[in-house]
Amino acid sequence: LTSERYGVQRLPFSHLSDGDFAFFESLLPGRVVTDPDELRTFNVDWLQSMRGCSKMLLRPQTAAEVSEVLRYCNQRNLAVTPQGGNTGLVGGSVPVFDEIILSTALMNQVISFDKVSGILVCQAGCILESLNQYLAELDFIMPLDLGAKGSCHIGGNVATNAGGLRLLRYGSLRGTVLGLEVVLADGSLLNCLASLRKDNTGYDLKQLFIGSEGTLGVITAVSILCPRKPKSVNLAFLGCQSFSQVLGTFTACKGMLGEILSACEFMDDLCMTLVESHLTLSRPVTGSPFYILIETSGSNSAHDEEKLNHFLEHVMASGLVTDGTVATEDKKIKALWSLRERITEALTHDGCVYKYDLSLPVERLYDLVTDTRARLGAAAKRVVGYGHLGDGNLHLNVTAESDSRSLRDAIEPFVYEWTARHHGSISAEHGLGFRKKQHIEYSKPRGAVLLMQQLKAMLDTKGILNPYKTLPAAP
Ligand code: FAD
Ligand code: MLT
Ligand code: ZN
């Protein structure tokens, strides 16, 4: 094991001993993975850009087991990386060195669901799509949706404060998560698993763990408020000739669709070229430099369709939109959503991907793509822009035939400086993980970072939880 990886020095954590293997095997019989072949996929992140060298993966089933694991690791000074579905995009979910991987995969039970309040309580390892399927039978949905739904865990979603495709309608997890059960680094169990809409008794501790990326505690269960399943869903796929027409369409849909608007996403023409060439999907509308997906969800299909038609007539007549199609049946809706949701996957087939996830004032969102494209010229294979238009969240991605220091130097810190100059955030929804932790000061004042480091030191005195992630090393 080398003492340095990715420019980071291994901290003086203990190395696993035979006694440790014996302890974990007796605590979690048959649920300790040490086979190097089996460990490989858990050591590598979804983007295949980071590779750890953990020698052990643990699969607890209960919060009590997680508590025993962490109590032991804390005493022994063993570092731990919590892992859900391993779909994170910032290198937070895999070890950097030999940290033990603590997987929530077997913590996949629904604990309760209340049909009156819509409050779901479940273990952290439930897969987002499975929860959505479970709820659909009861006429409810999860308040979040993302392209990684088939693999990501609700605990991972909360740990990253994932945004996704429905945030525009149902808000962030900071509002929909009502309670959490968390195991702290020393093994103590924090039960804040309330199922109350309102609770002003002291500080809202659960907020500390939402978006903490496994650095402050291991989330073992989640209480979350789920909306009713909409009776009527429509999806419009529209082509625009310029980004200012995209903005005009966005403004119009907010005004004209109002309370039934449930998603507003955009992607540029190059994104569509990528999904067509690498995934053989086909777009229903061609010939536009920009496309928008507008989804409505409501309770009355006649009312929703009338509103949507009104809106479409307006944007077509005013020239904001030049072409488009509308889907109302499930199969076609899914096919249209694939064009947007699978851009991430298509990018990985295009070469080496440099991935950025920025919050920006919506009027300037695409200027960063244009400026980056002009700056990189032929050094990049493609520079594409897509994202959650309704949330002011741009996904800027650059592809190249291979990883190159000079290309990365041309992109960074340019992208971060550009974002800071426009008072944006260098991580809108993916988190900082390992890849972006050094750049936190583009979006947070030094005093805020210092306070975060103090909180980390207080909750995890030995620093065993997901070391090397989220925060730069304390001074
Ligand atoms: P992991 O990747 O396993 O872990 C992510 C981080 O959370 C790590 O730091 C890990 O240590 C920590 N963690 C995981 N579980 C726990 C736990 N129980 N307790 C404490 N810490 C934990 N993100 C968005 O925000 N919006 C999107 O639209 C979106 N779309 C995506 C589409 C694709 C195709 C892919 C591959 C990713 C996408 N992502 C998106 C990123 C990713 O899916 C999310 O960050 C997701 O929430 C991660 O969940 P996970 O279970 O895979 O977590
Ligand atoms: C998305 O919105 O598709 C995700 O955040 C993933 C990505 O940025 O590629
Ligand atoms: Zn996204």
Image: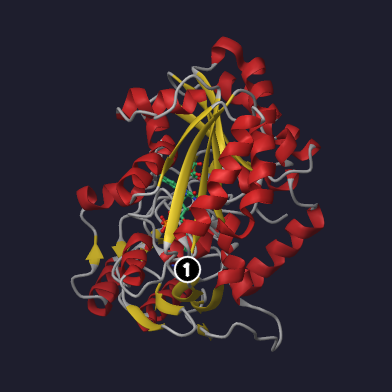
Which residue is more in the foreground, 410 or 134? 134
Q: Which residue is at a point 45% across and 22% down the rendered structure image?
A: 286
Q: Is residue 70 visible?
A: yes
Q: How many marks?
A: 1
For residue 245, side relative to residue 3 (left or right): right
- Expressed as whole percent of the image width and height from the top left, the position of residue 402 reads 43, 21
Residue linked to disc 1: 77
> Where, quadrant-wise, is the N terminus in this rendering?
top left
Where 182 sits versus 464, above or below? below
Quarter that holds the C terminus: bottom right
- The quarter of the picture where residue 423 lies is top right
Determine the residue positioned at 39% across, 80% down: 63
The furthest residue to the top: 378
Q: Which residue is nearer to you in this view: 104 or 141? A: 141
Task: Give the residue at the far bottom of this rendering.
Answer: 201
Relative to the observer, which residue lies in front, 422 or 135? 135
